């Protein structure tokens, strides 16, 4: 009876898992779908490579797991007390010991090669077309568009203590339930979205104004801690238009779960049409001395 009950639970769990995998990702909405346990569809080359690397690792792990299961089955069937009443007294086997030392090393090398290539690609940023500063606050984000993109980390670091390159800035706060419009997801929508053109390299300088936050956008394959007094950089080049959602991924206090990130990727023409209105609406929001830059030791470092 217990065996049948356990078998039924296992079958139900397997069916639920298959159903979860069969639910398609809501790629057009840039977020996970109901019951989805797979990764959000990537819209950048880096995100796609992350997905490929994840699939590669899953295959390796599955093969290792199956191999171990087969070995356990052989041991249970061939070397149990009934089938093998006289146990072997073998204590050493040079070939076997070399094999179980060398094979894991080879597997780790096979994993390391694409891993290092992916890490290098994440930090090998092309010349940016747009630079945006993202500052985490308790509990919302502030975005500042730059007039020009710094050509080097040294130039970006030199501009941290001034506003000479600030074009316009705005706060992005999560919408309450009674503020949502039709089609806007709950707990993910904001009043002011970041707007960027499709097919352009966008550099995001990430910092924090009070405590440590984390700027994460799964569809773009980017994540960087927003540390006060420290400037991190990430980049993305979205190849599809749409609205994409992320969240603060560092426990930052009471309303940590309520500071989403929304980036809307539009055509180049739509972006050019949006810019004048954004400048007119948000230009006065640029602070005289940004709180995130008050620390004299602020410095630009690659995202880790």
Image (cartoon, rainbow, N blue to C red):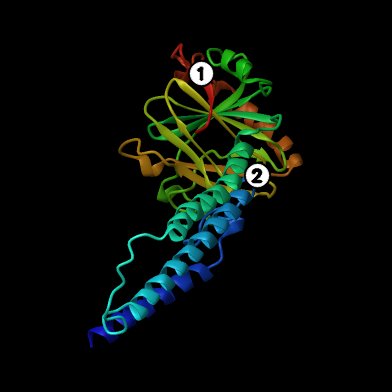
Residue at (56%, 58%) from the top-left corner?
Answer: 55
Left or right: residue 247 versus residue 282 is: left
Dot 1 surroundings within 10 Å: few (below 14), some, or many (20 or more)? some
Nearest the camera: 29 or 43?
43
Residue at (44%, 57%) from the top-left corner?
Answer: 94
Q: Which mark is residue 189?
A: none
Residue at (65%, 44%) from the top-left corner?
Answer: 265
Q: Position of residue 84 (x, y in %)?
A: 31, 80
Q: Residue furthest left?
A: 1
Nearest the camera: 61 or 126?
61
Q: Position of residue 98 (x, y in %)?
A: 47, 54
**Residue located beneath label 2 in the image:** 265
Dot 2 surroundings within 10 Å: few (below 14), some, or many (20 or more)? many
Residue at (51%, 65%) from the top-left corner?
Answer: 63
Q: Earlier in the sequence, mark 2 or mark 1?
A: 2
Quick one: quadrant of the N terminus? bottom left
Q: Residue furthest right?
A: 269
Q: Position of residue 238 (x, y in %)?
A: 66, 44
Give the CA distance from mark 2 to mark 1.
Answer: 29 Å
Q: Residue furthest bottom?
A: 1
Which dot, 2 or 1, sits closer to the camera? 1
Left or right: residue 222 versus residue 167 is: left
Dot 1: element: strand
Dot 2: element: strand
Q: Which mark is residue 299?
A: 1
Q: Position of residue 112 (x, y in %)?
A: 55, 45
Marks 2,1: beta carbons within 8 A: no
């Amino acid at each position: 009876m217990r065996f049948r009950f356990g078998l039924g639970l296992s079958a139900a769990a397997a069916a639920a898992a298959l159903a979860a995998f069969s639910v398609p990702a809501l790629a057009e909405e840039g977020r996970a779908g109901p019951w989805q346990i797979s990764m959000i569809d990537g819209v950048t080359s880096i995100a796609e490579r992350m997905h490929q690397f994840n699939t590669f690792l899953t295959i390796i792990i599955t093969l290792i797991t199956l191999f171990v299961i087969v070995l356990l089955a052989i041991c249970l069937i061939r070397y149990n007390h009934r089938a093998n009443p006289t146990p072997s007294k073998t204590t050493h086997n040079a070939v076997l010991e070399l094999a179980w030392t060398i094979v894991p090393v080879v597997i780790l090398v096979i994993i390391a090669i694409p891993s290092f290539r992916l890490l290098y690609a994440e930090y090998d940023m092309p010349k940016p077309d747009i630079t945006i500063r993202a500052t985490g606050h308790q509990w919302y984000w502030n975005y500042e568009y730059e007039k020009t993109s710094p050509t080097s980390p040294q130039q970006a670091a030199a501009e941290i203590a001034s506003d000479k390159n600030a074009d316009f800035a705005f706060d992005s706060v999560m919408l309450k339930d009674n503020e949502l419009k039709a089609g806007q997801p709950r707990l993910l929508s904001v009043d002011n979205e970041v707007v960027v053109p499709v097919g352009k390299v966008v550099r995001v300088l990430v910092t924090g104004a009070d405590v440590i936050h984390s700027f994460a956008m799964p569809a773009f394959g980017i994540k960087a801690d927003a540390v006060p007094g420290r400037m991190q950089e990430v980049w993305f080049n979205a190849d599809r238009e749409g609205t994409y959602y992320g969240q603060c991924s560092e426990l930052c206090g009471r309303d940590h779960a309520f500071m989403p990130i929304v980036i809307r990727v539009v055509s180049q023409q739509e972006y050019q049409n949006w810019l004048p209105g954004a400048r007119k609406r948000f230009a006065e929001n640029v602070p005289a001395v940004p709180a995130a830059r008050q620390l004299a030791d602020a410095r630009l470092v690659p995202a880790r």
